[in-house]
Structure formats: structure tokens, C-alpha cells
Image (cartoon, rainbow, N blue to C red):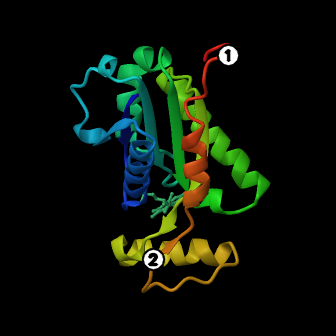
Amino acid sequence: MKVLICYASTEGQTRKIARFCADTLFAQGHSAEVLPVALADPIDLAVFDAVIVAGSVHLGRLQAELSDFVTAHGEMLNGMPTLFLVVSLAAAGQDEGDRRDLDGIASDFCDRAGWSPGATHHLAGAFRFSEYDFFKSLAMRYVASQHGQTVDPHADKEYTDWSALSDLLRDWPAPKAGAG
Ligand SMILES: Cc1cc2nc3c(=O)[nH]c(=O)nc-3n(C[C@H](O)[C@H](O)[C@H](O)COP(=O)(O)O)c2cc1C
């Protein structure tokens, strides 16, 4: 299977996730091309068997360039196996309201783009203080404190569950009923 992994990443965690997906799929015998969405077009999706779209949440939204890409290719994406990976810090917690908000962010994104992903998964991201400027760092320390967490502003902190992601990819795309 030839898989395209198209991603948008503001501070780098989704890029790391995209590369992990490629390595995992490669180890399973698939081929995978990893492309930052800003460099993806022009692209012919017909040469791929499946597509993973990944982006991260900032101030309640996914990246606009990811939305542009999915909107432009929605018809094609709707006809092939797709997986939507949504990276956020809210996904690291257990708050039901936060979970509902994340579902809303993902479904609004898809509705606006006219895309029905085969599956949507929320992944916990990271605090990347090494990438933040002074104000972002201050804001993120405040966000952490609001969630009862203490973070060291001199160290990045990763919440992504790599083993769960690996399990998810092992079963994706699910074989069609009756196939095999
Ligand atoms: C300025 C800023 C705003 C953020 N807003 C949200 C948010 O609204 N909801 C959330 O769950 N996470 C939020 N996050 C956390 C990011 O989604 C998380 O750090 C993720 O790992 C970023 O992925 P990236 O490095 O690929 O951009 C925010 C992070 C930053 C720096």
C-alpha cells in the first residue's frame, strides 16, 4: 500500500507524529510519503492508496493551510481510505468538556472542507517550550497551571502515546467486510 501522510505542524510535534506514522507503516511493508501540507500541491492523490491527514489545534482551530488542502481535494479524499489525526494538549487530559470541544473542532473542520474521513483520532501533543517565544511560553505556562500541571519552561514535555498510535496504524485501513 502506498500512503500519503500530509501534515501541518506549528511547533513540530505533528511533524514528529507524521514521521512516526511513516516509519511504522514502512515497518509493516507499506510505502509512505510524508509531506508538509504547505508543499503538497500540486499533487495527484490518485497515485496513493490511502491518505493520513494530520494537524494540530491552536486556539481552538486547526491550521488554515490544512483546511485549504482538504477542501481542494475533498472529493478525491472521500473516495479513498483516510485517517484524520488531530493533535492537541486537551487530548492529554480526561476532561469530558474538553473532549467534546475537540470533537467539535474536528467535525467543524471536516464539515467546512466537505470531507468525511474514514476515521478521526485525537492524539495528545506536547509542550514545546524550545519553540515558544516569551509570550507563548507565558501563555502555555498559564494553560498548564489552569489544568493543575506544573511544567518546567526550560524543558519540552511530550504526552503523545506512541504505542497507542502504533496499534492504531496496525489496524488501518480496516479490511473491507468480506475481503480476504
Ligand atoms: C499558542 C498555542 C495555542 C494552543 N491552543 C490549544 C487549544 O486551543 N487546544 C488544545 O488542546 N491545545 C492547544 N495548544 C497545544 C497544541 O495543540 C500542542 O502543543 C500540539 O502538540 C502542537 O502541535 P504542533 O507542534 O504540531 O503544532 C496550543 C498550543 C499553543 C502554542
Q: In screen coordinates, is 15 left or right of 28?
A: left
List the residue tagged with mark 2. Answer: 156
Report the front residue among 9 and 111: 9
Number of marks in picture = 2
Whether residue 60 is visible to the viewer of this picture, yes or no, is: no
Q: In screen coordinates, is 60 left or right of 92?
A: left
Question: Is 34 located above or below residue 91 in the figure?
Answer: above
Which of the two labelled residues, at mark 1 and mark 2, occupies the earlier sequence position?
2
Give the residue displayed 60% in from the left and 32% down from the top: 119
Give the residue displayed 24% in from the left and 25% down from the top: 43
Q: In screen coordinates, is 108 left or right of 20?
A: right
Report the front residue among 28 and 70: 28
- 10 Å neighbourhood of mark 2: few (<14), some, or many (≥20)? few
Q: In screen coordinates, is 59 left or right of 107?
A: left
Report the quarter where the N terminus lies: top left
Give the secondary structure at mark 1: loop
Kindly report the distance in space between the C-alpha atoms of the residues bearing marks 1 and 2. 43 Å
Q: Based on the displayed image, in which of its 4 quarters is residue 111 positioned? A: top right
Give the residue displayed 50% in from the left and 46% down from the top: 61
Q: Based on the displayed image, in which of its 4 quarters is residue 173 positioned? A: top right
List the residue tagged with mark 1. Answer: 177
Report the quarter where the C terminus lies: top right
Report the front residue among 17 and 93: 17
Q: What amino acid is at disc 1?
A: Ala
